[in-house]
Image (cartoon, helix red, strand yellow):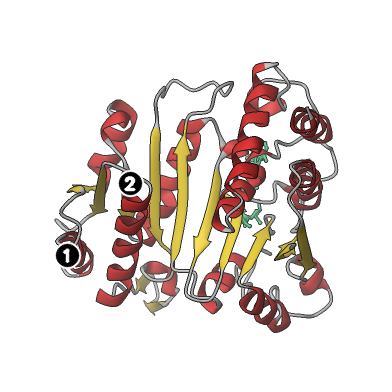
Amino acid sequence: MAHKACLIRGDGIGPEITDAVLSIIDAAGVSIEWIEVDAGLKCVEAGEPIVPDRTIAKIAEVGLALKAPMTTPVGKGSVSPNVTLRKRLDLYACVRPVKTLPGVPTPFEGLDLVIFRENTEDVYSQIEYMQQPGVAFGTKVITEAGSERIARAAFEYARKNRRRAVICVHKANIQKICDGLFLRTFQKVAQDYPDIETWDVIVDALCMQLVTKWRNFDVLVLPNLYGDIVSDLSAGMMGGLGVAPGANFGSKAAIFEAVHGSAPKYKGLDKVNPMALLLSATLMLRHIGEEKAAKDIEGAVEKTLIKGIKTYDLHGSAKTSEFAAAVASELKG
Ligand code: NAD
């Protein structure tokens, strides 16, 4: 029986990497009924919200989506489509596996982390105002419930995937109340997982240690802002935005998406790397029980890279469509 998943083709490079990924999933023999839903610039141009209510309702109904990047219009009153989806669908866990890949050059050999970023709280509450001319105030929101569910999600993942350690990242030495609550809640949850090693680290120390002792780290749990920054740092460490996958899990749905944005200057050039969205799709395949297809695709990507078929960001000359065709042909054997 075919699986059902919503599909957002996105803006900029979104449609071309989506085509590449769908052709590879098809070659892997997985049958998915894609339900295309509207979001992004075309909705704004039509005078609609960037993510219309019907799109939110459909994703909540199906419970699953693959999403290509969307452009956030710049200017007053523009809401980020990603923040909208996270808030409306309560996608509280942003999960990013960060692993070196054969054929992707990086000095961080053996890098293997999984980032659990809290996705709904912190300064992303977007409550800020000018208290008086020249003085801006902002609000950071951390709740016990929000901290508990992200910590629990990380520990459950670690147990299921036989990971060694779960590490809490914070700045509780300065943000004693907000980050103090995040850390204390993490420590309380950790008591339910005595089989997993745990410790905590201050976010600035983590950044330094990540680039010097990356093998020491395993599953990381972070509040939203630190998670946002450390995710991009880690994406760079694994080989760049072109290869970094991600997933957002929540109480109503799961959405799988690349870490990168819509890279508008490359739109229509058939140039960018579809690997980040493709590896996000393999996370989705695992989520729906298609473990073999996910493994087959990862194997085919590896063989393609080792043959030297790479896009420009990995110092190759293959076009998006050529890379996709090479992976699909590995799959078809
Ligand atoms: P970006 O990630 O779109 O692009 C930055 C640079 O990274 C590109 O110029 C390119 O050099 C490289 N890059 C990105 N994706 C690549 C790929 N697949 N292959 C090879 N190289 C790649 O970031 P930006 O330029 O800051 O943002 C562009 C738009 O995307 C903005 O409107 C931003 O708000 C939006 N955005 C969306 C998402 C999302 O939908 N999840 C995430 C980040 C940014």
- What label sits on residue 323 in the rendered view? none
Do the residues bearing badges 1 and 2 touch, measured as CB atoms within 8 Å? no
Q: Is residue 2 left or right of residue 165?
A: right
- Where residue 55 appears, as percent x and y from the top left, is 71, 77
Residue in the picture at 31% in, 39% down? 207
Residue in the picture at 36% in, 52% down? 160
Camera-side residue: 74 or 297?
297
- Where residue 292 appears, as percent x and y from the top left, is 61, 42
**For the residue labelled by badge 2, is the local secondary structure a helix, a strand or a loop?**
strand
Residue in the picture at 43% in, 70% down? 120
* Residue 127 picture quarter: bottom left
Above or below, 91 against 21 in this view is below
- What label sits on residue 180 in the rendered view? 1
- Assign the C terminus to one quadrant of the image: top right
- Where residue 304 appears, as percent x and y from the top left, is 70, 24
Above or below, 190 against 229 in this view is below
Q: Count of labels shown?
A: 2
Tell me the crowding category of disc 2: few under 14, some 14 to 19, or many 20 or more residues within 10 angstroms, Cα based: many
- Assign the N terminus to one quadrant of the image: bottom right
Circle 1 or circle 2, nearest the eye:
2
Camera-side residue: 93 or 125?
93
* Residue type at tag 2: Val
Say which label, 1 or 2, has the lower sequence index. Answer: 1
* Residue 116 picture quarter: bottom left
- Where residue 18 appears, as percent x and y from the top left, is 76, 50
For the residues labelled 1 and 2, the Cα–Cα distance comes to 20 Å
Residue topped by disc 2: 219
Q: Is residue 259 left or right of residue 22?
A: left
